[in-house]
Amino acid sequence: MCRLFSGRRSRRAAFTMIEALIVCVYIGIIALIVLPRMTGATRRARETNMRATLREIRNAVGSFQAETGLYPAQVADIVAATAPANGLDRNGNFVSIIPADFRGPYLRAPGGKLPKDATTGAADWKYTTTPPVGQVNSSNPLNSLEEGPYSLF
C-alpha cells in the first residue's frame, strides 16, 4: 500500500503538457494587456518632459526680451554667457544689443547647451524669427497622445 501511494504522488507532482500550455497562454494574454500600457506611459513621460523643458525655454526667451528689449536672434542665445551682437525686434529686424542690458545666461543648462526635446532626442527646437517673433515649439512632426501635433505645444 505504501508503494501505490508513493507512486501516485510522484506522478501527480509534475505538470502535464496541457497545464503548461494554459499557463503560457495566460502569460501571453497578460503581456498583451500590459505592454501597450507601458509603452503609452513612456510616451506620456516624454511628452511631460518636453512640455516642462519648453516652458523653461519660453520663460528664458521672455526674460531675455524683458531685459534687453529684443528677442534672441536664435534660441541658443538664451544660454549664452556673454551678450550676443544682435537681437530681433517685434518685426524680426536685427538690432544691436546693448551689452549692459544683457544679464544672461537666461537658461542654465549642462554644458551651456540647449536642453534636448524629449520627443525627438535632440535640441532641435523650432524658433520663429519672423512675426510673431520669439515663439518656441517642438520640431517633432508627430501628434501627441492627447493634444494634437507636438509642433503646436
Image (spheres, grey):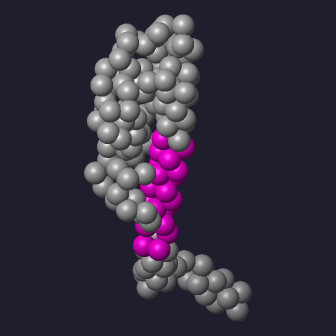
Give percent across and percent down for residue 143. Answer: 34, 59
Name the residue located 32 percent from the left edge and 39 percent from the top edge.
131
Q: Please provide the residue range marked out in magenta.
A: 32-54
Near-viewer residue (77 or 141): 77
Near-viewer residue (41 or 114): 114
Name the residue located 43 percent from the left edge and 63 percent from the top edge.
147
Name the residue located 45 percent from the left edge and 77 percent from the top edge.
29
Q: Residue furthest bottom?
A: 1
| Relative horizontal placement of residue 67, taking residue 4 as reference (left or right) | left
Q: Quadrant of residue 4?
A: bottom right
Near-viewer residue (131 or 83): 131
| Relative horizontal placement of residue 83, taking residue 88 as reference (left or right) | right
- Above or below, 13 against 93 in this view is below
Give percent across and percent down for residue 123. Answer: 37, 32
| Relative horizontal placement of residue 74, taking residue 3 as reference (left or right) | left
Give percent across and percent down for residue 141. Answer: 28, 51
Give percent across and percent down for residue 139. Answer: 32, 43
Q: Main secondary structure of the magenta part?
A: helix
Name the residue located 40 percent from the left edge and 39 percent from the top edge.
136
- Above or below, 98 against 73 in this view is above
